[in-house]
Image (cartoon, coloured by chain):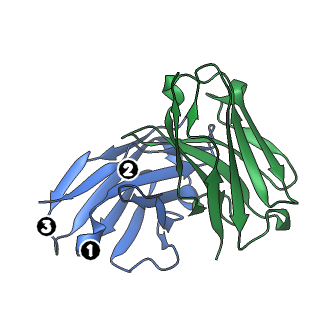
Amino acid sequence: EIVLTQSPGTLSLSPGERATLSCRASQSVSSSYLAWYQQKPGQAPRLLIYGASSRATGIPDRFSGSGSGTDFTLTISRLEPEDFAVYYCQQYGSSPQYTFGQGTKLEIK
Amino acid sequence: QVQLQESGPGLVKPSQTLSLTCTVSGGSISSGGYYWSWIRQHPGKGLEWIGYIYYSGSTYYNPSLKSRVTISVDTSKNQFSLKLSSVTAADTAVYYCARAGEDYSNFDYWGQGTLVTVSS
């Protein structure tokens, strides 16, 4: 089983700042199969990034993804108030077919 | 616009079977090309994939839950369902249905989620 470890657990930043979230896999993950989600309280997760670096439909370009192999990064270039949420990475392909990281909480400083 | 909506009891007794249904609108399950999944989230915790079904009825389950999970599809109603047997308090969670997109690698549409509590 591929384990995804996200860091930091909590990130405290101010609006306008840049956020860098990390997702590290216990084994190599195909870049095509790494996704990022945003989840706000009481809501379902929302797909942000797929294929490690492609933005999903309607996602602002301040969100970007990068990485390969075992190290992946979600960057939010300039935080807006609505960006404060929990972010999850997710991989596909290794049994169990889908696994998620434990999440990074992005909170207002 | 594809929409998914979970339905089912919010309270299940220990040892009984949890049953949920996901109704899909704005798209047809029988058109193929997607995996229809169940995912759960324990209170205040992360996400756990339970399993998926294809329109043909083929399934794949998380090995950690496989012995207790059954996912089925009713294409005439554009619904798919989850049954989880022998539940315990550890199965208390928000249950989401979701669609795995065109390359099956990510979940592009989600239901709003439904909280299921296991308690006597």
Numbered circles on residues, count: 3
Spatial separation of the CA atoms under disc 2 and disc 1: 17 Å
Outermost residue toward the top in this view: B15
The three-letter code of the residue at mark 2 reads Cys
Question: Left or right: B96 with respect to A6?
Answer: right
The residue that mark 2 highlights is A23
Picture quadrant of residue A98: top right
Kindly identify the residue that appears in the image at 64 percent across and 45 percent down.
Answer: B8
**Pick the front one: A12 or A23:** A12
Chain at numbered mark 1:
A
Question: Left or right: B79 with respect to A82?
Answer: right
The residue that mark 1 highlights is A77
Task: Say which chain is green.
Answer: B
Kindly identify the residue that appears in the image at 40 percent across and 58 percent down.
Answer: A39
Chain at numbered mark 2:
A
Task: Say which chain is blue.
Answer: A
| Whole-percent x, y for residue A30 in the image | 56, 54
The three-letter code of the residue at mark 1 reads Ser
Spatial separation of the CA atoms under disc 3 and disc 2: 22 Å
Chain at numbered mark 3:
A
| Whole-percent x, y for residue B105 in the image | 62, 57
**Pick the front one: A70 or A12:** A12
The residue that mark 3 highlights is A14
Q: Earlier in the sequence, mark 1 or mark 3?
A: 3
Q: Secondary structure at mark 2?
A: strand
Kindly identify the residue that appears in the image at 64 percent across and 29 percent down.
Answer: B65
| Whole-percent x, y for residue B36 in the image | 71, 54
- Is residue A28 positioned above or below B33 on the image? above
Question: Left or right: A13 with respect to B47?
Answer: left
